[in-house]
Image (cartoon, grey):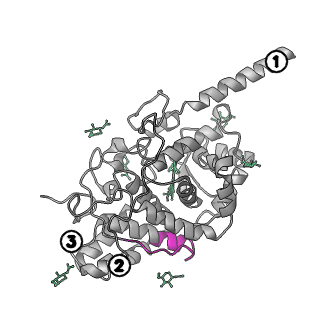
Amino acid sequence: MAKLVVLAVLASLISTVSCQSWTWSIYRSWGYPSPTWGTPWTYNSAPATWTTPPPPPSSNGLKVGYYADHNCSNAENIVRAAVEKASAGILAGLIRLAFHDCFVRGCDASVLLEGSDTEKQGFPNLSLRGFGIIDAAKDALEKECPGVVSCADIVSFAARDASYILSYKKINYTVPAGRFDGKVSFANETLGQNLPPPFADLATLKRMFADKGLDPTDMVVLSGAHSIGISHCPSFSDRVNPPASPSPSMDSDLAKKLNQTCDTPNNATTTVPQDSVTPDALDSQYYKNVMSGKVLFTSDAALNSSETLELVKKYAGSDDWNTAFGAAMVKMGYIGVKSSKEGEIRKKCGVINKS
Ligand code: HEM
Ligand SMILES: *[C@@H]1O[C@H](CO)[C@@H](O)[C@H](O)[C@H]1NC(C)=O
Ligand SMILES: *[C@@H]1O[C@H](CO)[C@@H](O)[C@H](O)[C@H]1NC(C)=O
Ligand SMILES: *[C@@H]1O[C@H](CO)[C@@H](O)[C@H](O)[C@H]1NC(C)=O
Ligand SMILES: *[C@@H]1O[C@H](CO)[C@@H](O)[C@H](O)[C@H]1NC(C)=O
Ligand SMILES: *[C@@H]1O[C@H](CO)[C@@H](O)[C@H](O)[C@H]1NC(C)=O
Ligand SMILES: *[C@@H]1O[C@H](CO)[C@@H](O)[C@H](O)[C@H]1NC(C)=O
C-alpha cells in the first residue's frame, strides 16, 4: 500500500515536470517546418535579468479622425461598409488579424504581405482569415482617395468595426490613425517568437505581453477575444487527450466532447467554437468560462490563477469589460507604429510598393 502511494506521488511529480517543458508536438500534424520539434520551448527574448518591462506604447503621433484631415473623410465609412459584409467567423478573424499584426513588427500590416516566407505563411497560420475584407476595403479606398489610407490603419479600423458588430454595439471605441505600412515580414517571427503559443503559462504570457509594453491587465482584457471564433484541434489537444493532459482544469464534459469531436489529437481540419456558450457574441462570457473550466487553451485556463482571478471575477458577465476591451485594443494599436520615414502607404495590401 505504502509502495503504491510512493509510486503515485512519483508519477505525479514526473508528469508535473514534463509539463514544464513546452512542446510543439501538438502542432506536428499541421505540415509546417518544425521550428524546434522535440525541443522544449522556453520564451527567451528577454535577458535573464529582465525586471522592468518596456514602457507602455505611446500614441506615436496617431490621431482620431486622421483621414478627415488628410483628404479622405470617408475612409472609416468605407472600411465599415466592407466589414459589414463579413460573416461572424470572418469578423472574429479580423479581430485576431489586428493582434497578429501588432505583436509582430508593430501594427504595420506586415501580417498581410504575400510571399513564400512571410508572417502569413508563419507557423501555424491555419485560422488567419479576413484578408478578403481588408483587400475589398483597400480597393474601395484606392478609388476614393488613392495612396492615402494605410493597410495598417485598415486592419485597426476593421478590428474595431468587427468588435462593434459582434458585441451588438456594446464595444464602441474610436481608433487613432496615421500608421504607415512596413516593408518586412518574416514567417519565423510569429508563433513562439512574438505570438504566445496556446500552451503558454501565466508567467510566459505576462512576459510576452510585457515585451510589447502591455501589462497583465491588458493581457487579461484582450484574452476576452476568445469569446468568439474558432480553434483547430491541434491547438488544444494537449488538454483533451487524457494521458498527455497537463491541465486537469478543463471541465470534464467539455474535454469529453472535444475528445470526440476532434477524434484524433492531430486532426487539423476540424474546428470548434472558442466559447461554446455564446459562440458568436464578443462578450464577457469568456471570463465565466475561465472560472468554470470551459476554455480551450492552457493560456486561457492560466487566467484562473490567483494572480489574475480578481480581474477575471470582475469582468465575468460584466459590461465593464466592453469599455476595457476597447481601451486595450487602442493601446495594442500603438505597438511599434511606423512613421512616414519608416513605412509607406501600400497600393495593395498584399505587396510592398515598387520603388
Ligand atoms: C493571450 C495569448 C493568446 C494566445 C495564446 C492565443 C492563441 C490562439 C489560438 C491558438 C487560436 C486558435 C488557432 C486555431 O487553432 O485555429 C486563437 C484564436 C483566436 N484568437 Fe487568440 N490568442 C491569444 C490572444 C488573443 C488576442 C489578444 C486576441 C485579440 C484581441 C485574440 C483573438 C483571437 C480570435 C478572435 C480567435 C478566433 C479566430 C477565428 O475564428 O478565425 N487572441 N488564439
Ligand atoms: C488635400 O487636397 C488638396 C487639393 O487637392 C491639397 O492641396 C492638399 O495638400 C491636400 N491635403 C492633404 C493633407 O493631403
Ligand atoms: C498558411 O501557410 C501555408 C503553408 O505555408 C499556405 O499554403 C497557406 O496559404 C497559408 N495560409 C494563409 C491564410 O495565408
Ligand atoms: C458609437 O460611438 C459613436 C461616436 O463615437 C456614436 O456616434 C454612436 O452613437 C455610438 N454607438 C452606440 C451604439 O453607442
Ligand atoms: C528569419 O528569416 C529571415 C528570412 O528568411 C532570415 O533572414 C532571418 O535570419 C531569420 N531569423 C532567424 C532568427 O532565424
Ligand atoms: C481521446 O482520448 C483517447 C484516450 O482516452 C485518446 O487515445 C485520444 O487520442 C483522445 N483524442 C483526442 C482528440 O485527444
Ligand atoms: C478557478 O479558481 C477558483 C478559485 O481558486 C476555483 O474554485 C475553480 O475551481 C477554478 N476553476 C478551474 C476550472 O480550475
Q: Amino acid at mark 2?
A: Gly
Give the image location of residue 88, x and y in percent: 52, 67
Whether residue 232 sits left or right of residue 78 in the image: it is right
Q: Under tag 2, what secondary structure?
A: loop
- Front one among 25 and 339: 339
Mark 2 or 3: the one toward you:
2
Alpha carbon separation for disc pair 2 and 3: 17 Å
Farthest residue, direction right:
1
Residue tagged by mark 1? 4
Alpha carbon separation for disc pair 3 and 1: 72 Å
Q: Under tag 1, what secondary structure?
A: helix
Residue 35 is covered by the magenta coloring: no
Q: Amino acid at mark 3?
A: Gly
Q: Which residues are magenta?
A: 161-176
Q: Which of marks 1 and 2 precedes in the sequence?
A: 1
Give the image location of residue 4, x and y in percent: 82, 18
Give the image location of residue 78, x and y in percent: 35, 78
Q: Amino acid at mark 1?
A: Leu
Residue 289 occupies quadrant = bottom right
Q: Under tag 3, what secondary structure?
A: loop
Local packing at callout 1 (Cα closer than 10 Å; few below 14, some 14-19, many 20+) is few
Residue tagged by mark 2? 65
Q: Residue at x 48, y 27 (%)?
A: 38
With respect to residue 291, does 62 lie above or below?
below
Is residue 51 visible in this depiction of the protein? yes
Alpha carbon separation for disc pair 2 and 1: 69 Å
With respect to residue 298, does 13 lie above or below?
above
Residue tagged by mark 3? 147
Farthest residue, direction left:
355
Residue 163 is covered by the magenta coloring: yes
Q: Which of marks 1 and 3 precedes in the sequence?
A: 1
